[in-house]
Image (cartoon, helix red, strand yellow):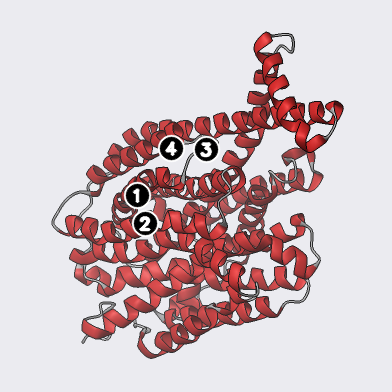
């Protein structure tokens, strides 16, 4: 085999594929696995809910900083060393997270875990793209997509099971055997090809770009992670972080387009369909993470689902996505153009949101969610693979890695924007609907009076006297109003998401038809 080739064949390619897919899946599971352990962490570490939220935020901030730099770091350190070193860092940080005995220690090691995990996410996609021939790029995207789509779903499921049955530290210790095996397979099978020239390795380090990236994107992720819980711009440090984010990102973009050796080559946006692919990566992240956020919050807070129950209800849809991706990859391999599959995918996703808006009530049963969530799985299966193929189609050389890192970062930022916007909207509109409903209630209306009397009579056996029973009746009425307002808000949220997905469909047709990447270009690819 030509040692300059990036392509792999037979059992070597199979082993490398399993390794990188497992790593990307592991990284994304850890994005959400902590979410279901907040109560246990608060109790064991003596931390407040606000402090625990930093455990989640630290991981996300580190991720979004490292992901766009992955292509550059792979060149500087060598792909094998960078990927293998990141696996080791991720695994060691997981061990230290599990051994943490105070909240500050846990936050620090979650940040280190996020730094290691960011490389697993972006570099996995690049490796898969390079080891498969051009006609199988759809298949490579499908394999990577299985990790991206199933990770956020499996996280709460696995976390819920572990927390219900074991100590919270086990949510970190489960990474150890997979991490050790992945590190061994990385150094044994992933090759450092000779396409990176000595000049590229010795090129001047873009320190200003690195600083601006860390400051700008890190501050933006901080605002998105903490803004809602900190009352947004009413909190001084959120306001300062917003200003820093704007200045840092604007400065980063201006600098990266003008410097000779950028840490993130933004010029790749002018090639192929990277620009339109980046926009739709943001939309994909927005849809994937916001829908994954809205549904669990609703069913756990208002329908009484456990974390494990919630995760299991999401599992069939995730499995359908995993099944659909190779099918879609095969369709792309036979010549179906990605931009003709994407409108169908967004249409399916919009249908899912409209169905959800029609079935949610304070009494909706678990079985009612099965088919809408399966429909969501089908939509995601048709969405991720064509989008990845569209974004990377026609690219050569190091542009492949640059585009992979950029789209991965934007996808994650899209998810953060989606969660932040939906969370803020739900909080605000619940108060709006509640105020609107209360304004229409007249305590002198016979219907309202009869209802209060019925509730009071029902409470007499518990309260013992008429005053307590009447107060309990009013409290029950208040709870019912709040519940109805909440349901109306979630209905609105799902409907607006559906409208959003329909409105973005026409943008897809701005994508250009790109020729598949030639074998010789992949063989000479510099990440």
Res 356 label: 4
Q: Are marks 3 and 1 in contact (CB under 8 Å)?
A: no
Q: Nearer the viewer, residue 181 or 393?
A: 181
Say which quarter of the image contains residue 427. top right
The residue at which mark 2 appears reads as 316
Horizontal relation, residue 100 to residue 392: left or right: right
C-alpha span from label 2 to label 4? 16 Å
- Residue at the far left in the pictured view: 334
Label 1 residue SS? helix
Task: Please state the total of marks drawn on the protein image.
Answer: 4
Where is 291 relative to 201, above or below? above
Q: Position of residue 288 (x, y in %)?
A: 45, 49
Q: Are marks 1 and 2 in contact (CB under 8 Å)?
A: yes
Cα distance between the residues tagged 3 and 4: 14 Å
What residue is drawn where x is 60% and y is 50%? 249
> Within 10 angstroms of label 4, few (less than 14), some, or many (20 or more) residues?
many
Do we see residue 71 in this rendering? no
Quarter residue 402 falls in: bottom left
- Could you tell me residue 306's position as x and y percent? 57, 56
Of labels 3 and 1, earlier in sequence is 3
In the picture of the structure, the residue carrying the numbered disc 3 is 363
**Badge 1 is on which residue?**
374
């Amino acid at each position: 085999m030509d040692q300059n080739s990036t392509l792999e064949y037979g059992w070597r390619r199979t082993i490398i594929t399993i390794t990188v897919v497992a790593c990307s899946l592991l990284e994304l599971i850890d994005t959400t696995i902590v979410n279901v352990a907040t109560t246990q962490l608060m109790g064991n570490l003596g931390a407040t809910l606000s402090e625990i939220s930093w455990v989640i935020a630290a991981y996300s901030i580190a991720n979004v900083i490292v992901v766009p730099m992955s292509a550059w770091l792979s060149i500087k350190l060598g792909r094998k060393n960078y990927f293998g070193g990141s696996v080791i860092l991720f695994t060691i940080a997981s061990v230290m997270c599990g051994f943490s005995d105070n909240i500050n220690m846990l936050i620090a090691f979650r940040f280190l875990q996020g730094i290691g995990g960011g490389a697993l996410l972006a570099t996995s996609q690049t490796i898969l793209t390079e080891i498969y021939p051009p006609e199988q790029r759809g298949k490579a995207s499908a394999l990577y997509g299985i990790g991206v789509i199933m990770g956020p779903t499996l996280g709460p499921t696995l976390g819920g099971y572990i927390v219900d049955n074991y100590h919270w530290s086990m949510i970190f210790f489960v990474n150890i055997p997979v991490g050790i095996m992945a590190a061994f397979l990385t150094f044994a099978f992933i090759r450092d090809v000779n396409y990176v020239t000595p000049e590229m390795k010795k090129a001047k380090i873009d320190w200003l770009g690195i600083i601006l990236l860390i400051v700008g994107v890190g501050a933006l992720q901080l605002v998105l992670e903490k803004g809602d819980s900190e009352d947004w711009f009413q909190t001084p440090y959120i306001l300062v972080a917003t200003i820093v984010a704007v200045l840092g990102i604007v400065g980063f973009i201006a600098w990266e387009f003008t410097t000779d050796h950028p840490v993130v080559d933004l010029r790749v946006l002018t090639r192929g369909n990277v620009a339109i692919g980046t926009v739709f990566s943001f939309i994909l992240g927005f849809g994937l993470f916001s829908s994954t956020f809205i549904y669990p919050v609703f069913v756990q807070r208002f329908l009484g689902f456990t974390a494990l129950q919630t995760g299991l209800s999401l599992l069939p849809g995730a499995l359908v996505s995993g099944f659909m991706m190779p099918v879609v990859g095969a369709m792309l391999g036979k010549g179906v153009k990605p931009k003709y599959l994407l409108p169908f995918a967004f249409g399916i996703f919009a249908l899912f949101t409209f169905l959800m808006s029609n079935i949610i009530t304070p009494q909706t049963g678990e079985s009612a969610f099965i088919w809408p969530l399966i429909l969501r799985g089908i939509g995601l299966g048709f969405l991720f693979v064509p989008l990845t193929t569209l974004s990377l189609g026609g690219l050569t050389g190091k542009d492949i890695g640059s585009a992979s890192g950029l789209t991965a970062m934007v996808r994650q930022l899209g998810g953060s924007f989606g969660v932040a916007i939906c969370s803020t909207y739900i909080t605000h509109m619940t108060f709006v609907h509640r105020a609107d409903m209360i304004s229409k209630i007249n305590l002198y209306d016979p219907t309202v009076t009869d209802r209060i009397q019925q509730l009071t009579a029902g409470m007499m056996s518990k309260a013992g006297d008429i005053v307590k029973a009447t107060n309990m009746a009013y409290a029950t009425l208040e709870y019912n109003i709040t519940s109805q307002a909440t349901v109306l808000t979630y209905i609105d949220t799902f409907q607006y998401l559906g409208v959003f997905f329909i409105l973005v469909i026409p943008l897809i047709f701005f994508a250009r038809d790109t020729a598949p990447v030639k074998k010789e270009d992949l063989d000479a690819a510099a990440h």
